[in-house]
Image (spheres, rainbow, N blue to C red):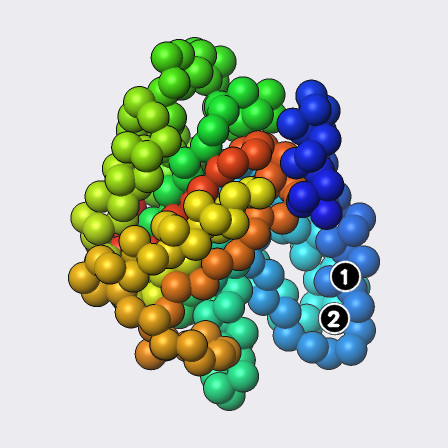
Amino acid sequence: TSPQLLAEMQKGAKPTTSQVNVGQFQETFKQFAKEGKDLLYVAFSSVLSGTYQSAVMARDLVLEDYPEAVIEIVDPKAAGIGEGYLVMRAVAARDAGRSLAEAKEEIMDLAPKLRTYFLVDDLYHLMRGGRLSKSAAIMGSLASIKPILWIDAEGKLVPISKVRGRKKAVRELLELIKADIGESTALVSYTNDLEGAEALKQEMLALEGIDEVLVMPLGPAISQVLIMPLGPVIAAHVGPNSLIGFVIGKENRK
């Protein structure tokens, strides 16, 4: 679990991750094809992992044996909570009786507007996993600097701001979120800092344009701030004491 992993990381453990391989994707896709079920897969950003490419290769292999199968793969140029939100929207569309093509169109329209901001305690973990350059990691580790990163239009994780001290960094995170709010749904994710996540949620609820309505499942008209812990794979790269704020913007990412 993420808490177990993060506890080991705080003791000095250096976990590594591995992408889903072609064979694993092929096995899953083939099962859907055999059962005649259409499939929509929302991938991890192709810039941050080879998972998307593995999925495309597996789809091509399955289509050789099942040419009538419907296997749609989306590269949202997103990760973690942003990717998860797109899955929620696709599920809501499915449950509302909309077609797979309509669900795909909706999330492809939303994906460029995703705003996912990461406040991490230590850039070393991102550098170690190859998601950030060594020079950027060193700059972020100096003099209690707390770096904020985001996923840009290309799907890359890049530093966007450097702030001295965590309290100021949280305020800067809120300013970045406030700058472009296109929908009233917001999400917060975290690694072993639930208290910080709850505080960030309350701060986000105070922003104009974000409301809370405790209704599930998620749908286009539902407004709320959800809090979700990061899973162990992403947690292995961002490390302990990370906070992630997410909104849908009005404009596409640049």
Q: Residue at x 68, y 56 (%)?
A: 59
Image label count: 2
Q: List x then y, in percent, for residue 204.
A: 30, 56
Position above or below: 11 against 28: above
At label 1, which amino acid type do we have? Thr
Position above or below: 109 against 200: below
Direction from residue 118 to residue 68 in the image, left or right: right
Residue wearing tag 2? 32
| Quarter of the figure that contains the C terminus | top left
At label 2, which amino acid type do we have? Phe
Q: Residue at x 36, y 20 (%)?
A: 145
Q: Nearer the viewer, residue 201 or 127?
A: 201
Position above or below: 73 against 137: below
Q: Is residue 81 visible?
A: yes
Q: Nearer the viewer, residue 14 or 34?
A: 14
Q: Residue at x 19, y 48 (%)?
A: 179
* Numbered badge on residue 28: 1
Q: Is residue 19 visible?
A: no
Asked if disc 1 and disc 2 are in contact, CB closer than 8 Å, the reply is yes
